[in-house]
Image (spheres, helix red, strand yellow):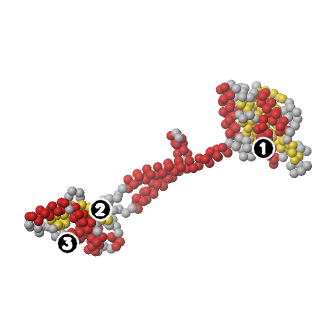
């Protein structure tokens, strides 16, 4: 599909895109606003041999062990982030269970060093700094009993954080904008493809008159404009016929308007038997069919219309018994497109004038409007 086609689809369903875009951005902003602020502080510790070691050989051996045994550093880091140490720190600070819910403790050994980094996150910056200090103190106390040779000594104390680490409102809104736009475009295209078969079906039925099964007036006027353009460009003849059908009582010759749709349906079936594939048959008015005959002169079109009138005039049938006989009465107005300067409404007006004259004439004539005057061809009465 071309980019222009996609653009037309998106423009047609702009309200879907806009609605999803606004909803997504607002939801992102609300979610971001509802997220609690998180503060973070970091303290560091160094793992080294105990200061009480005064024998040089033991001191050198201890340094060698510290540098080679990564497990010792990792053990101290695991101790620092353990639940036991956190409980001891909370007990020392006399924190409640609700205050403890917001804390997150992590510890790691900086690669290539004997330095352990302790990170504490929480919702209260002052409480975060106090809790980090308490966790560090409890960790130092606990690991002092693990090894006789090594000790953990504070290096940098935890400071009170001044800015939250999760303050990313602008970033979240930007992501919401991108997500909302992408989601809106995707849904709009999805809706188009889901509805496409139905749209095609509706487009087809929108050019068909439901009562008669012929084309409707809107489609006929479009085809009339197209055929007039082709006729003018290629200089070939074009004829337009209007066939008025009346459903009449056989006895008193009065119209039976309640059965007008049935009359048009029957006339449509009879007319289609005579028309060519390239001819266009449509319902023009409630009681009138329109026929567009490309590459057909006025005289030839008149012959075609006379055949149609003969078929229609031969119809007589009973409705509800012998006392209810009906027949179809037809009137034909015909216009020939010879003056290529005529516009569509002018050409159509010629056919309407011819039909008006035929309706007033009870002799059953086909009236042809051509070369600025009416021509008449008489046929036998119905």
Query: Residue 191, percent across and down?
Result: 55, 50
Q: Residues within 10 Å of mark 3 (few under 14, many from 20)?
A: few
Q: For the residues labelled 2 and 3, say whether their Cβ atoms are less than 8 Å apart.
A: no
Residue at mark 1 to residue at mark 3: CA–CA distance: 105 Å
Residue found 89% across the figure and 44% down from its top: 250
- Secondary structure under the numbered disc 3 in the rendered image: loop
Residue found 73% across the figure and 32% down from its top: 293
Query: Residue 361, percent across and down?
Result: 85, 34
Q: Nearer the viewer, mark 2 or mark 3?
A: 3
Q: Which residue is mark 2?
A: 40
Q: Earlier in the sequence, mark 2 or mark 3?
A: 2
Front-most of residues 148 and 276: 148
Query: Residue 177, percent across and down?
Result: 43, 51
Residue 369 shows in the view: no
Considering only vertical position in the picture, is 136 above or below 188? below
Q: Is residue 115 left or right of residue 368?
A: left
Q: Earlier in the sequence, mark 1 or mark 3?
A: 3
Q: Nearer the viewer, mark 1 or mark 2?
A: 1
- Secondary structure under the numbered disc 2 in the rendered image: strand
Q: Earlier in the sequence, mark 1 or mark 2?
A: 2
Q: Is residue 98 left or right of residue 335?
A: left
Front-most of residues 290 and 124: 290
Q: Residues within 10 Å of mark 2 (few under 14, many from 20)?
A: many
Residue at mark 2 to residue at mark 3: CA–CA distance: 29 Å
Q: Which residue is mark 1?
A: 265
Q: Which residue is mark 3?
A: 145
């Amino acid at each position: 599909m071309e980019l222009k086609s996609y653009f037309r689809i998106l423009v047609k369903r702009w309200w879907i895109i806009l609605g999803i875009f606004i909803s997504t951005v607002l939801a992102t902003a609300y979610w971001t606003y509802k997220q609690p602020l998180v503060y973070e502080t970091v303290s560091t510790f160094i793992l080294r041999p105990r200061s009480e070691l005064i024998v040089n050989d033991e001191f050198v051996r201890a340094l060698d062990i510290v540098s080679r045994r990564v497990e010792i550093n990792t053990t101290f880091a695991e101790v620092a982030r353990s639940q036991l140490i956190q409980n001891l720190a909370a007990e020392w600070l006399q924190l409640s269970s609700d205050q403890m819910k917001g804390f997150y403790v992590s510890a790691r050994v900086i690669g290539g060093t004997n330095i352990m980094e302790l990170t504490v996150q929480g919702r209260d910056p002052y409480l975060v700094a106090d809790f980090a200090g308490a966790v560090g103190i409890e960790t130092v106390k606990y690991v002092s009993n693990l090894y006789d040779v090594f000790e953990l000594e504070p290096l940098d104390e935890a400071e009170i954080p001044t800015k939250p680490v999760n303050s990313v409102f602008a970033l979240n809104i930007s992501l919401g904008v991108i997500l909302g736009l992408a989601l809106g475009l995707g849904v709009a295209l999805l809706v188009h493809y889901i509805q496409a078969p139905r749209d095609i079906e509706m487009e087809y039925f929108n050019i068909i008159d439901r009562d008669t099964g012929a084309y409707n007036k809107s489609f006929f006027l479009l085809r009339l404009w197209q055929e007039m353009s082709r006729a003018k460009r290629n200089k070939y003849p074009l004829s337009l016929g209007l066939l008025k059908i009346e459903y009449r009582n056989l006895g008193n010759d009065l119209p039976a308007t309640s059965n007008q749709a049935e009359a048009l349906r029957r006339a449509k079936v009879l007319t289609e038997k005579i028309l060519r594939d390239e001819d266009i048959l449509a319902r023009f008015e409630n009681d009138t069919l329109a026929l567009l005959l490309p590459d057909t002169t006025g005289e030839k079109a008149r012959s075609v219309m006379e055949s149609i009138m003969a078929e229609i005039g031969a119809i007589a049938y009973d409705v509800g018994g012998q006392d209810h006989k009906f027949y179809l009465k037809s009137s034909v107005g015909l216009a020939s497109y010879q003056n290529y300067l005529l516009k569509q409404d002018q050409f159509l007006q010629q056919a309407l004038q011819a039909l008006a004259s035929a309706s007033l004439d009870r002799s059953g004539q086909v009236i042809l409007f051509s070369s600025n005057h009416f021509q008449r061809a008489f046929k036998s009465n119905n």
